Amino acid sequence: MTIDWLHFTPWTALAGGLLIGLAAALLVLFNGRIAGISGILGGLLRAARSDVGWRLAFLAGLLTAPLLYAMMAALPEVTVEAGSGTLVAAGLLVGVGTRYGSGCTSGHGVCGISRGSPRSLAATAAFMFAGFVTVFIVRHALT
């Protein structure tokens, strides 16, 4: 493995991680809710009237944050080396996985592990293992 030192940004990565952790901590502190994106989005489908506002505000923040950032700095160039079919299949698999895993990486990996949840530790380990295997297969076994 090599590190692209020219584009290595440890300070912005640290700042982003701190902001994610702070947002997750504030949500659980003030609202008693876990900042798991799949749970927040999925909860809109069956939310009580009192839950709709904070869920929409959280999701609006996720969508507007990159727009605000783009007003202050150039967005990084994104290159996706996959076709539309692959992206659709990947999205569907992630969606199915979040249902079977009772949450996503943000819920389990960021919030669950910080709470010391054994279930979240196992789920995050499974997410990571599946990612490692997928990268190995796509990058090494299929080429």
Image (spheres, helix red, strand yellow):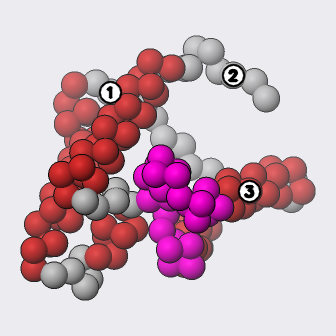
Residue 15 position, x and y percent, is 38, 26
Residue 73 position, x and y percent, is 28, 24
Figure quadrant of residue 72: top left
Say which of 82 and 34 sits in front: 34
Nearer to us: label 1 or label 3: 3
| Secondary structure under the numbered disc 3 in the rendered image | helix
Q: What is the three-letter code of the residue carrying label 1? A: Ala
Q: CA distance from mark 1 to mark 3?
A: 33 Å
Q: Which residue in the protein does label 2 denote?
A: 3
Provide the residue span drawn in magenta.
98-124
Nearer to us: label 3 or label 2: 3
Q: Is residue 71 magenta?
A: no
**Residue under the point 65% across and 21% down:** 4
Q: Is residue 120 magenta?
A: yes
Give above or below for 9 relative to 124.
above
Dot 2 alpha-carbon crowd within 10 angstroms: few under 14, some 14 to 19, many 20 or more: few
**Residue under the point 51% across and 20% down:** 10
Figure quadrant of residue 7: top right
Left or right: residue 4 versus residue 109 is right
Q: Which residue in the protein does label 1 denote?
A: 74
Give above or below for 90 relative to 63.
below
**Residue under the point 36% across and 40% down:** 20
**Residue under the point 15% across and 62% down:** 54
Q: What is the three-letter code of the residue carrying label 2? A: Ile
| Among numbered discs 1 and 3, the one appearing first in the sequence | 1
Q: CA distance from mark 3 to mark 2?
A: 22 Å
Dot 1 alpha-carbon crowd within 10 angstroms: few under 14, some 14 to 19, many 20 or more: few
| Secondary structure under the numbered disc 1 in the rendered image | loop
Which mark is on residue 129?
A: 3
